[in-house]
Amino acid sequence: MLIVMRAQATEQDIAQVCARIQSLGFRAHVMPGAERTAVGITGNHGAVPAEEFEGLPGVAEAIPVSKPYKLVSREVKPDNTIVDVAGVQVGGAELALCAGPCAVESQEQILESARAVKAAGGQLLRGGAYKPRTSPYAFQGLGEEGLRYLAGARAETGLGIVTEAIDVETFDLVEEYADCIQIGARNMQNFSLLRRAGRARKPILLKRGMSSTLEEFLMAAEYILSEGNYQVILCERGVRTFADHTRNTLDLSVVPAVQRLSHLPIIVDPSHGTGKRDKVHPMALAAVAAGASGLIVEVHPNPDRALSDGYQSLFPDQFRELAGEARAISALLRSRAEARSQPAAVPA
Ligand code: PEP
Ligand code: MN
């Protein structure tokens, strides 16, 4: 159920609707929009009676939400959500470029990476301090030491940092340092972690599970929003298929599909999406052309010596070239969209 308020509704009208929702034992989610505010309801297991709300002052209508996900849905919030990550507007007009190594390996490595990302025009630095690895014997990340190095790289370059939280136990620590907390593909359906992310005060980058459907992906995001954190960025990172010429199959068709159903921004990870350095550049450009709001790309100062994902990491020069071309495609699409939205010239 969604309560749509009239454009003239006052703060007091909205508060009264929220109070009624709470008195029924449910949770209210106020979603301000460009023209009017809507209030979403969660926590109900059956239909919510519309009559409870229709007579309240300021209420325009009470409409049932047809999808299993509610708060992530465009039915509830028609306007695009823009997520602010350390001043970078993800989902805004500009393409958001996030890059850096798979894992933080040392202070020098992350500083060198951060400088390269900055010099190439990247706006956010990625790097894992806690790594979810297939093998328990593989490098697991530097933990808090890695978080400290990331903070040092931020202090030097001004780049906001995106880093992964892999469990509830270390979430507080990651939240303390990160500007945006990544939930990885393997944890997309770790529901206790998603709920913890929903109580975080930082934006969340939620990666699509490696065999998840669009609905499962949006339901995972719904867990986060349902706990009160509306700052969620979705990320396509490839799914498992029979194809073996790439590590994963980058499902770019999910970008317009998400945009139709959800107001949340979606970015693309062509590094894990392909798993091969030579495929990263073309698929990154394709992602921008498909309408992605940003890219997250693995870049390493010395990929051949990387402790994880070196074979899919770009050299800094390759990232510089990619960033320039990605921005050019994005600017072209933006100027075409602006031209389409201009009123036609009146003939003299
Ligand atoms: C990563 O970003 O380094 C990572 C492990 O990604 P994913 O969860 O998409 O595999
Ligand atoms: Mn990686």
Image (cartoon, rainbow, N blue to C red):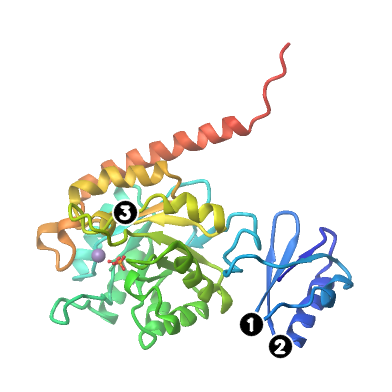
Residue positioned 58% across, 70% down in the render: 68
Q: Quadrant holding ligand 2?
A: bottom left
* Cβ–Cβ under 8 Å for marks 3 and 1: no
- Residue 126 vs residue 214: left or right? left
Q: Secondary structure at mark 3?
A: loop
Mark 3 or 1 closer to N-term?
1
Residue 48 or residue 201, whichever sits in front = 48
Q: Residues within 10 Å of mark 3 (few under 14, many from 20)?
A: many
In whole angstroms, how far apart are the C-alphas of marks 1 and 2?
Answer: 8 Å
Name the residue rendered at 36%, 77% in the picture. Answer: 165
In the rendered structure, which disc, 3 or 2, sits on the residue that comes first in sequence?
2
| Residue on which disc 1 sits | 43
Using residue 311 as the reference point, say whether residue 213 is left or right of it: right
Assess whether mark 2 and mark 1 are in contact (beta carbons under 8 angstroms).
yes
Kind of residue indicated by mark 2: Gly
Give percent across and percent down for residue 215: 48, 65
Residue occupied by mark 3: 250
- Is 310 situated above or below 71? above
Q: Residue furthest left?
A: 305
Secondary structure at numbered mark 2: loop
* Residue located 65% across and 56% down the image: 78
- Sequence-earlier tag: 1 or 2: 2
Amino acid at pointer 1: Gly
Residue 115 placement: quadrant: bottom left
Vertical side of 289 occupied by 165: above or below: below
Residue 166: quadrant of the picture: bottom left
Q: Quadrant of residue 52?
A: bottom right
Residue designated by label 2: 25
* Quadrant in the picture for the N terminus: bottom right
Q: Residues within 10 Å of mark 1 (few under 14, many from 20)?
A: few
